[in-house]
Structures are given as structure tokens and as C-alpha cells.
């Protein structure tokens, strides 16, 4: 039974149309629409599932982008990474302190390392974007070496902005950032798709030369040649008096003592630098090593290192601190593997 309506034809006036003759064409149209919807649904499903079928290489790249929280940093870092070529070097010193023995051979793969320690300015950029709170800021204090006693004391309000406390001078932009814990340093590097260097990588780089003339510090080496200081260390009677004869009582601007043959700066003195390595005795069986409290190694020595006592600027010297510790003389620099995404290892300047 048809449905009759009246349509106003162009030339013939109102006429009657049998709607029953239009049922079949309508079903065809409906079928096309249904097929389109099903096809769209199928494609959307495939797109949503696509990451699960990515090849391994693409998945690695994806995981870089999907690292949680702070990896959403969108600013580029004002920093340069230097390529440290593959090579085999000795790590440790059989004539050094027990922590540096026994020396062993390390076959280093090529890697990239920041030309300088991370600066206050670079860290400020990071905080501006991420609103990151350092451990020292959360705990409310940072560590400072008290000159009269030679003891470390907790200074209320000391942080990367005011390494000696809010009543003292603020940190300067071109100096290494300090009062950052290992956790802070690790988060910073991860945020830019980078990582901390291992302590062996750091020593491999140091053994390429720690001064502009390629000198590698060992026990007893002078820190002054021809009335010129080679690094920012401690001069004077430790811990009572630091004369600052090298020009600096605390940190110095990165690069103030020149560039090493490998292209790095500050590979001796200024600040200790966190590494990704737990502090373990060289050559210790792993089951024995696991009993040691988790402390992380830092390298390079600092402005508090006296030639008479510390000599932490020696290439093989190891410092170790709990990862939540923040001190006025520990900073860090980042490293990377050569295959990382380009934007994570290029600078903006
Ligand atoms: Ca100094």
C-alpha cells in the first residue's frame, strides 16, 4: 500500500506520487551509510591500536616521548653535548685509596656528554617550565661546610637559588647549579631525554685531559703552574681558611679554567658531579655489594678540595653520597647515547 503525497512540480502543478516505489532506493542509500559508518569505525580502531604494532625502533622512540611527567619539557636547552669516542681506558688507580682499587680496563662505547656542568641558568629554565621542586626545597635546607669546625651543617632555606642560604648571595647564572640531589639531577636529565653519565664514562672523558693542555691529575700533582691555577680548588689551611688564590671562594663560572682537548670544561674542581653509578667497591662480588647502602658516586672534586687532604680532582677519585643529599659543592652534567632523538642533544644557541 502506497503513501500518497502531493508535490509541486515545476510545470505541472500539484501531482500525486506513489511513495511505495521509493522504498527500494532508500534501502540502498541506508546500506551505503551503514557501510560508511562501519568502515570509519574499523579505521578508527586500527589507528587506536597502531602503537601496539609499531616496530621496535619506533617503539623506542615512542617510549622516549612517553616518559612520565617531566619529559613534557618543550623548551630547548642552552647546552652543547660533546661526542666522547669509543675507547679502552684504565679505571681506578692501584696506587690510590682503597675505593679506587683494583684498577680495571673499561671498554667505553661512544657517548655524548654535556660540555659544561649544568648551569644555574639552565636549571632555572627547567624549573620555569616544569615548576619542579628540588629535594632541598622540599626538605627546607641544604648542606654547607662550616669553615671553623670543618663539619657539614644544614642551612635552613639553602637551595639551588641560594646555595648558602637566603641571607647570602643568590646563585649566579653562569655557575654550576648546586644544592641539587641525585634525584633532582636524574629528573633534569630525563626531562630532556638524557641521562647521567656512569662513573666509568666520566673517568673515560677525564682521562682524555682535564685541563686545556691535556693534563690528567694524579696524586701529588700541583694545581698551579707558572703562577696560574689549573682549577677551582681550595687554597690555604683546610678547613679554617680558604684564600681563594685561584680567584674563587666558592663556585666559578663554567669554563673559567679553559676547555680540555676533548672540548669539555670543568673536568677537575669547581663542583663534584653526580653520576648514574651506585657506590660499590671495584671488583666486589655482586652478592656482597648488595649489602652496601645505596649511595651514588660523584666525580671531579670541588672548590672545597684541598691538595693536602681531598685531591678529589684526580681523574680516578670517587666521592659517594646518599641520593637525597643536597650540598653546596655537588652539581651534575648530563650524558646521552648517540642514537637519541636529535632534539634532545642539540642546543638552541
Ligand atoms: Ca677556589
Image: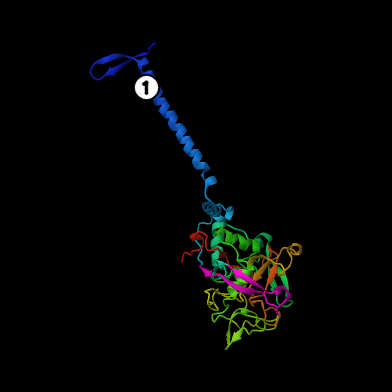
Disc 1 secondary structure class: helix
Q: Nearer the viewer, residue 235 or 241?
A: 235
Instruction: Return the x and y of residue 176 as percentages of the image width and height.
Output: 58, 70
State ligand 1's quadrant: bottom right
In this view of the protein, can residue 250 be seen by the observer? yes
Q: Residue at x 67, y 81 (%)?
A: 219
In terms of image quadrants, where is residue 60? bottom right
Span highlighted in magenta in the image: 80-108
Residue topped by disc 1? 25
In terms of image quadrants, where is residue 309? bottom right
Q: Nearer the viewer, residue 55 or 215?
A: 55
In terms of image quadrants, where is residue 15? top left
Looking at the rendered image, the quarter that the N terminus falls into is top left
Decide if residue 177 is on the left or right side of residue 39. right
User: In the orientation shown, which residue stands out farthest toward the left?
Assistant: 11
User: In the orientation shown, which residue stands out farthest toward the bottom?
Assistant: 226
Instruction: Return the x and y of residue 109 as percentages of the image width and height.
Output: 57, 67
Q: Is residue 260 above or below residue 192?
A: below
- How many residues crowd around disc 1 within 10 Å: few (fewer than 14), some, or many (20 or more)? few
Residue 16 on the magenta span: no
Q: Is residue 178 above or below residue 220?
A: above
In this view of the protein, can residue 327 be seen by the observer? no
The mark total stands at 1
Instruction: Return the x and y of residue 35 as percentages of the image width and height.
Output: 44, 30
Amino acid at each position: 500500500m502506497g503513501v500518497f503525497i502531493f508535490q509541486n512540480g515545476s510545470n505541472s502543478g500539484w501531482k500525486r506520487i506513489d511513495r511505495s516505489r521509493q522504498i527500494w532506493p532508500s534501502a540502498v542509500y541506508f546500506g551505503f551509510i551503514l557501510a560508511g559508518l562501519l568502515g570509519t569505525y574499523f579505521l578508527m580502531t586500527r589507528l587506536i591500536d597502531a602503537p601496539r604494532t609499531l616496530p621496535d625502533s619506533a617503539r623506542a622512540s615512542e617510549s622516549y616521548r612517553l616518559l612520565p611527567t617531566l619529559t613534557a619539557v618543550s623548551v630547548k636547552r642552552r647546552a652543547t653535548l660533546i661526542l666522547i669516542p669509543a675507547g679502552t681506558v684504565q679505571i681506578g688507580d692501584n696506587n690510590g685509596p682503597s675505593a679506587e682499587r683494583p684498577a680495571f680496563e673499561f671498554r667505553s662505547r661512544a657517548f655524548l656528554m654535556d660540555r659544561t656542568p649544568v648551569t644555574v641558568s639552565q636549571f632555572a629554565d627547567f624549573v620555569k617550565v616544569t615548576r619542579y621542586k628540588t629535594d632541598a626545597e622540599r626538605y627546607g635546607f641544604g648542606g654547607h661546610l662550616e669553615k671553623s669546625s670543618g663539619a657539614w651543617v644544614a642551612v635552613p632555606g639553602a637551595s639551588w637559588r641560594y646555595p648558602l642560604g637566603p641571607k647570602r648571595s643568590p646563585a649566579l647564572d653562569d655557575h654550576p647549579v648546586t644544592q641539587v640531589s641525585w634525584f633532582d639531577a636524574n629528573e633534569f636529565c630525563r626531562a630532556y631525554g638524557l641521562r647521567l653519565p656512569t662513573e666509568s664514562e666520566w673517568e673515560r672523558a677525564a682521562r682524555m685531559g682535564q685541563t686545556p693542555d691535556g693534563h690528567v691529575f694524579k696524586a701529588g700533582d700541583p694545581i698551579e703552574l707558572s703562577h696560574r691555577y689549573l682549577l677551582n680548588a681550595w687554597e690555604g689551611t683546610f678547613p679554617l681558611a680558604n684564600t681563594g688564590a685561584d680567584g674563587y671562594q666558592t663556585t666559578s663560572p663554567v669554563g673559567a679554567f679553559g676547555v680540555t682537548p676533548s672540548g669539555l670544561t670543568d673536568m677537575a674542581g669547581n663542583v663534584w658531579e653526580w653520576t648514574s653509578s651506585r657506590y660499590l667497591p671495584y671488583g666486589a662480588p655482586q652478592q656482597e655489594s648488595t649489602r652496601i647502602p645505596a649511595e651514588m658516586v660523584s666525580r671531579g672534586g670541588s672548590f672545597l678540595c684541598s691538595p693536602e687532604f681531598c685531591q678529589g680532582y684526580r681523574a680516578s677519585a670517587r666521592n659517594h653520597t646518599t641520593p637525597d643529599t643536597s650540598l653546596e659543592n655537588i652539581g651534575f652534567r648530563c650524558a646521552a647515547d648517540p642514537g637519541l632523538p636529535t632534539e634532545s642533544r642539540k642546543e638552541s644557541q
